Image (spheres, rainbow, N blue to C red):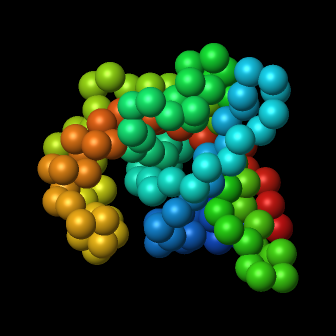
Amino acid sequence: MAAIDTATDLGARAAARLADEQVIWIVTVDPDGAPQPTPVWFRWDGADEVVVKSQPRTAKLRNVRRNDRVAVHLNSTPSGDDVVVLTGTAAIDDGGLSREERAAYDAKYDEGVRGLGTTPDGFHADYSVTVRVRLERLRGY
């Protein structure tokens, strides 16, 4: 069963937001069992996976290597409405992005990459690790 059922109101809202938003929060678990939320750029595949690029030596990667259970969520409204939280498992993909994924990622973050003062090639050299999150369950309101 798909994590995001677009036949439901929540699923339809989650899908629309995942398609449009620039940032998700990925929540990993540190060695002491404490949740560690981190805002990240991402690409959603339109189904049950989000892809995150990371610099190689980050706490989130160390956490994923120890415990693959993660949550991802979107910002709520200022009053706490439109909550979208997905849980799943994360894996580091040594193969990286496919050509199509890279093109879509670069198109989505063109302005952001330029804002960092770099190029897409420079960004991918710095954020060289690919993390794939398999989405399993959606909750929210």
- The residue located at (39%, 31%) in the rendering is 56
Number of marks: 0
Q: Residue 67: x, y in percent?
A: 67, 21
Image side of residue 84 versus residue 23, left or right: right
Residue 75 lies, in percent from the top left, at 68, 68
* 139 w.r.t. 7: above or below: above
Residue 43 in view in this figure: yes
Report the residue at 52% width, 29% height from top. Answer: 61
Residue furthest to the top in view is 66
Q: Left of 71 or right of it: where is 52?
A: left
58 displayed left or right of 26: left
Q: Is residue 38 above or below residue 1?
A: below
Question: Going by the picture, which residue comes out furthest to the bottom?
Answer: 79
- Where residue 117 sits: x, y (%)? 24, 66
Q: Is residue 106 above or below residue 54?
A: below
Give me the residue at 27% from left, 25% from top. 95
Is residue 3 among what the camera can see? no
Give the residue drawn at x 81%, y 23%.
Answer: 32
Quarter where residue 65 is shown: top right
Question: Would residue 112 appear left or right of 15 to someone viewing this image?
Answer: left
Q: Quadrant of residue 129?
A: top left
68, 120: nearer the viewer: 120
In the rendered image, the quadrant that contains the C terminus is bottom right
Q: Position of residue 123 (x, y in %)?
A: 25, 51
In the rendered view, tell whether residue 69 sits above or below residue 5: above
- Assign the N terminus to one quadrant of the image: top right
